[in-house]
Structures are given as structure tokens and as C-alpha cells.
Image (cartoon, helix red, strand yellow):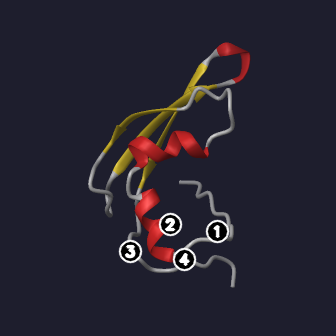
């Protein structure tokens, strides 16, 4: 299965960033660009290993796209560093 990995720096306390991401129902749409029509269809809560989050968004040519993410690692509040 393909994996998407990326890195970003957030200027906020680690605990606040973890708390934000622990509520995907409320906060994932806030991370999307305006006009994408992002909706969280379902989310296994509380977030943990094995949780699945289903998201739909407006795709090309007016078609809705669906994305299902599965949490494979979860160790709050632990800094995550990729590519170092």
C-alpha cells in the first residue's frame, strides 16, 4: 500500500497540536483549502492505532472523492520527525 509522508513545523506547544488532531470530526475540515467541500464522513474515536477516518471532498470535474485513512502509529504527545 502506498504511504504519504510529509513534514511541517507548527509554532505551538506539542500538547496543543496533539489535542487539535485528536478531534478529526471538528478539525480536519479546518486544514483543507477553502472550496474543497471537505467532510468527515466517519471517524473512530478516540483516535488510536487501528482508527479509521473517512473523508470526502470535491474532486475534479465536479465529482466527490473519498479518502479513508487508517492510524498505524499513535503515541501522544510525542514529537514526530520524518526524514532525519
Judging by the rendered image, the residue that carries numbered circle 3 is: 76
Tell me, yes or no, whether the two marked residues, 1 and 4, touch with CB atoms within 8 Å: no
Real-space CA distance between mark 2 and mark 4, rounded to the nearest whole angstrom: 11 Å
Residue at 29% in and 47% down: 44
Residue at 62% in and 17% down: 63
Real-space CA distance between mark 1 and mark 4, rounded to the nearest whole angstrom: 12 Å
Real-space CA distance between mark 3 and mark 1, rounded to the nearest whole angstrom: 16 Å
Tell me, yes or no, whether the two marked residues, 2 and 1, touch with CB atoms within 8 Å: yes
Judging by the rendered image, the residue that carries numbered circle 4 is: 80
* Numbered disc 3: secondary structure: loop
Q: In which quarter of the image is residue 71?
A: bottom left
Q: Earlier in the sequence, mark 1 or mark 4?
A: 1
Q: Earlier in the sequence, mark 3 or mark 1?
A: 1
Judging by the rendered image, the residue that carries numbered circle 1 is: 10
Residue at 65% in and 71% down: 11
* Numbered disc 2: secondary structure: helix
Amino acid at each position: 500500500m502506498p504511504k504519504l509522508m510529509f513534514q511541517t513545523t507548527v509554532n505551538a506547544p506539542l500538547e496543543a497540536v496533539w489535542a487539535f488532531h485528536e478531534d478529526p470530526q471538528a478539525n480536519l475540515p479546518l486544514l483543507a483549502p477553502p472550496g474543497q467541500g471537505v467532510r468527515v464522513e466517519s471517524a473512530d474515536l478516540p483516535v488510536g492505532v487501528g482508527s479509521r477516518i473517512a473523508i470526502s471532498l470535491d474532486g475534479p470535474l465536479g465529482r466527490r472523492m473519498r479518502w479513508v485513512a487508517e492510524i498505524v502509529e499513535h503515541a501522544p504527545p510525542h514529537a514526530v520527525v520524518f526524514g532525519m
